[in-house]
């Protein structure tokens, strides 16, 4: 991700890892997208749901922090999900028989770009940039 980004304009959303976290994250994202002038929040809602669900299911402890803010270099919006896990997300190959595991693959096809920033032993931030 580019080194120059605008600082988030609103406080982040801090969540406990629970089955309610994705719904709360979607509400937060919808509010932020509206504030940032997005006409459509479909891709953003998909992204935040996938990333928060992965944090909840695969890390399951600590806090989940969601940030949504404009990119300082391009007309894109950044979605970040921070958790305390150190394992990196893996995009699986398409498997028509699988009952789960397609979320990241779908997300990668709908966003401008995405990636992970390690926070040392303290976790990671998974980010995605969406067109405004």
Image (tube, rainbow, N blue to C red):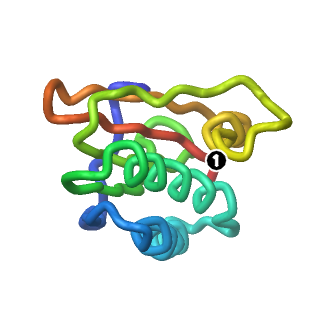
Q: On the image, which quarter does residue 119 sit in?
A: top left
To which residue does mark 1 refer? 131
**Residue at image coords 27%, 29%:** 86
* Residue 56 on image: x %, y %: 38, 54
Residue found at the far right of this picture: 96
Look at the picture and state if 64 lies above or below 29.
above
**Label 1 secondary element:** strand
| Quadrant in the picture for the C terminus | bottom right
- Side of 132 where 6 appears, left or right: left
Look at the picture and state if 99 lies above or below 65.
above
Q: On the image, which quarter does residue 52 sit in?
A: bottom left
Of residues 94 and 112, the one drawn nearer to the viewer in this rendering: 94
Look at the picture and state if 16 lies above or below 53.
below
Look at the picture and state if 25 lies above or below 87.
below
Of residues 124 and 30, the one drawn nearer to the viewer in this rendering: 124
**Residue at image coords 29%, 55%:** 64
């Amino acid at each position: 991700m580019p080194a120059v980004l605008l600082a988030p304009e609103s406080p982040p959303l801090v969540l406990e890892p629970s089955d309610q976290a994705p719904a709360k994250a979607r509400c937060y994202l919808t509010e932020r997208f509206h504030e940032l002038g997005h006409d459509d929040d479909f891709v953003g809602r998909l992204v935040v749901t996938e990333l928060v669900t992965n944090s909840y299911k695969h890390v399951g402890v600590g806090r989940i922090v969601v940030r949504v803010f404009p990119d300082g270099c391009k007309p894109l919006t950044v979605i970040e999900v921070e958790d305390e896990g150190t394992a990196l997300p893996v995009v699986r190959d398409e498997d028509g028989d699988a009952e789960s595991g397609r979320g990241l693959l779908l997300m990668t096809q709908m966003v401008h770009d995405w990636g992970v920033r390690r926070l040392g032993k303290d976790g990671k931030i998974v980010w995605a940039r969406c067109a405004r």
